[in-house]
Image (spheres, grey):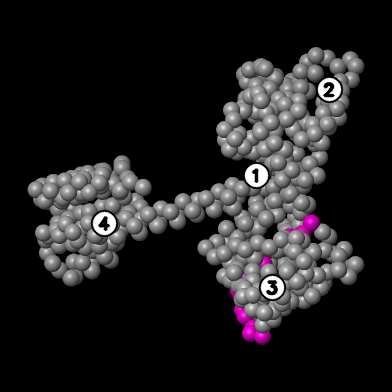
Amino acid sequence: MKKPGILLVDDDKNTADGLRKILIQDGYDTICVYTGNEALNLIETNHFDIVITDMKLPDISGFTIIEKVKKKDADIPIIMITAFSSLQTAIDAMKKGADDYLTKPVNIDELELILKKIWEKQLLIIQNRELRQQLDDKYGFSGLIGNTPEMQHVFKTITEVAPAAATVLIYGETGTGKELVAHAIHYNSERRDKPFVALHCASLSEGVLESELFGHEKGAFTGAVSERRGRFELADGGSLFLDEIGELNSHVQIKLLRVLETGCFERVGGETTLESDVRIIAATNKDLEEEIKEGRFREDLYYRLNVINLVLPTLRERREDIGLLTDNFLVKYAAKNKKDIKGFSPQCARILHNYDWPGNVRELENAVERAVVMARNEFIEPDNLPSNISQSIKKARKDTFRIPAGTTMKEVEKKVILDTLQTTNGSKSKAAKILGISTRKIEYKIKEWSNNNE
């Protein structure tokens, strides 16, 4: 990364110009001004990575510079320079927000050392900010897509439950996004800076599952060649997501219930009692109340987990979101595969909208990714879709083009335009592109139908 941009403020022109020359030679992009007001004007309209300012200026004090800079961006570091070696002045400058302090005449080696130290710290701040943005993009609400009332309810519930400490039980079919919701709850809570640890219970045998959750001591069983921390220890202070919790066996259910009630557990083969502050977010595609009736799930554990429950809608229950999701996945995978694809053909869009999606959003994403890879033209065609989906074309044609005898051409036109708007999630420009007409014509027709209904 290139060196930072510096604003240097000093009313002593010879000193300022000399420092600027040295800083530029060191690779710093440096702008120099000689009054406080010049500095304030530049600060209002430009971004600087570091500000170096004299304490005494002809118009305003260096303290005013500090206040204005910190008000705009509290993370911008400031180095204060003064001709007076006063401890109190240094203390006052630090209280106002200065990051370091130098006296005149400026020791160049000392200044360069301070700049190096400050910039290394700034790089960490920038990297952490970028990482936080990546986490927000991946696990915040931007990872969940939907405009339907069903999804708006999900978003509202996440917002309400995230700040709490209570356990959350997420219900949903496979592929509805249960882990995405768990991530969103964690990263919108006060625990967001602590670990988020996930464990998929269905994929592990009984012995392995217990060790994964609680850890084990060296020699606890064959193959335990060293001590190992479990997920409860790894997630301490954060959140533990237990996916497919309905698959837990009765022995592990008992141990999990104890942790939920006391926060205490022992590693497999261990005698030392450990504690962990963990928020449990569990998920299942099973009816746990039915599992309780069948004797496969503990009722007391169910009530501990089901403090707050959240039911995720299937994709077939929110078909109006399909167009929004397919567009999002198309942009994602077209960029990933370096392909210039403009959209889906009308026939393909109808198939995607009418298909029942038993695998929900995950199946839709996989289908769009495959279609992008297989596409040879600027629009994705039915043949680019997985065969089980493309074979539903006959039903799509039958449902879409069944027009009763005696229907007028105006009625046919209205049905075709409205159905296409539905497949494009209401986008007139996309519908116009699919139908081969202008956006203005669609707007004109909608206005005409609205006037006729008045």
Q: Residue 433 occupies which quadrant of the picture?
A: top right
Q: Which amino acid does label 1 sit on?
A: Ile
Q: What stretch is highlighted in magenta?
A: 271-285
Q: Nearer the viewer, mark 4 or mark 1?
A: 4
Q: Which amino acid does label 2 sit on?
A: Phe
Residue 184 visible in this rendered orientation of the protein: yes
Which tag, 2 or 4, sits closer to the chain's start? 4
Residue 223's disc is 3
Which tag, 3 or 4, sits closer to the chain's start? 4
Residue 331 visible in this rendered orientation of the protein: no
Tell me if 109 is positioned left or right of 143 in this view.
left
Instruction: Give the SS element for disc 4.
Output: helix
Label 3 to label 4: alpha-carbon separation = 52 Å
Contact check, label 2 and label 4, Cβ < 8 Å: no
* Magenta stretch encompasses residue 277: yes
Tell me if 386 is positioned left or right of 107 in this view.
right
Residue on which disc 1 sits: 145
Instruction: Give the SS element for disc 1.
Output: loop
Label 3 to label 1: alpha-carbon separation = 44 Å
Instruction: Give the SS element for disc 2.
Output: loop
Quarter of the picture containing the C terminus is top right
